[in-house]
Image (tube, helix red, strand yellow):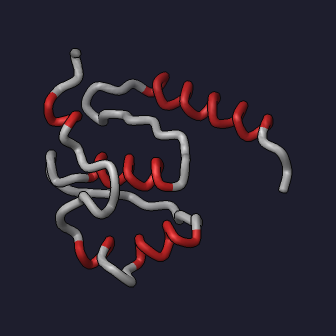
Amino acid sequence: MNEPLSSILRPKTLADFVGQPHLIGENKALQAFLINQKIPSMIFRGPPGCGKTTLAMIIANTINAKFHHLSGVSSKKEDLQEIIKDASKTRELAPLI
């Protein structure tokens, strides 16, 4: 068991997430996006530990999207290029709707 306690206790759903009621509260923007399964491009900004990654993970899990976590401190350009390459392959394999 090498997973950090903070990761184990991380909220898994919007119901468990605390804070940002102007975004995730009932009848608010993020709730509507998730219900409609249409998520626009978003940038979460704030200090470490405020919930940016947790909220992004909840969104990805709710809509069954693939989630890649990159740290601006430790990630390299090649890490991002690999994710983009993987996403391109996935898109090519996806059936057209």
Q: Quadrant of residue 59?
A: bottom left
Q: Is 26 situated left or right of 41 in this image?
A: left
Looking at the image, which residue is at 32% across and 57% down?
44
**Coordinates of residue 14 in the picture (x, y in percent):** 32, 61
Looking at the image, which residue is at 50% across and 61% down?
41
Q: Is 25 situated left or right of 64 in this image?
A: left
Between 74 and 32, the one nearer to me in the picture: 32
Residue 24 drawn above or below residue 71: below
**Coordinates of residue 53 in the picture (x, y in percent):** 30, 46
Between 68 and 62, the one nearer to me in the picture: 62
**What is the quadrant of the N terminus in the image?**
top left
Between 27 and 89, the one nearer to me in the picture: 27
Q: Is 34 situated left or right of 5 in this image?
A: right
Residue 94 drawn above or below residue 18: above
Residue that protrudes farthest toward the right in the picture: 96
Looking at the image, which residue is at 85% across and 50% down?
96
Q: Quadrant of residue 9?
A: top left
**What is the quadrant of the C terminus in the image?**
bottom right
**Coordinates of residue 18 in the picture (x, y in percent):** 18, 62
Residue 78 drawn above or below residue 56: above
Looking at the image, which residue is at 53% across and 63% down?
39
Between 1 and 4, the one nearer to me in the picture: 1
Residue that protrudes farthest toward the bottom in the picture: 27
**Coordinates of residue 78 in the picture (x, y in percent):** 49, 22
Residue that protrudes farthest toward the top in the picture: 1
How many circles with numbers are drawn on the protein? Answer: 0
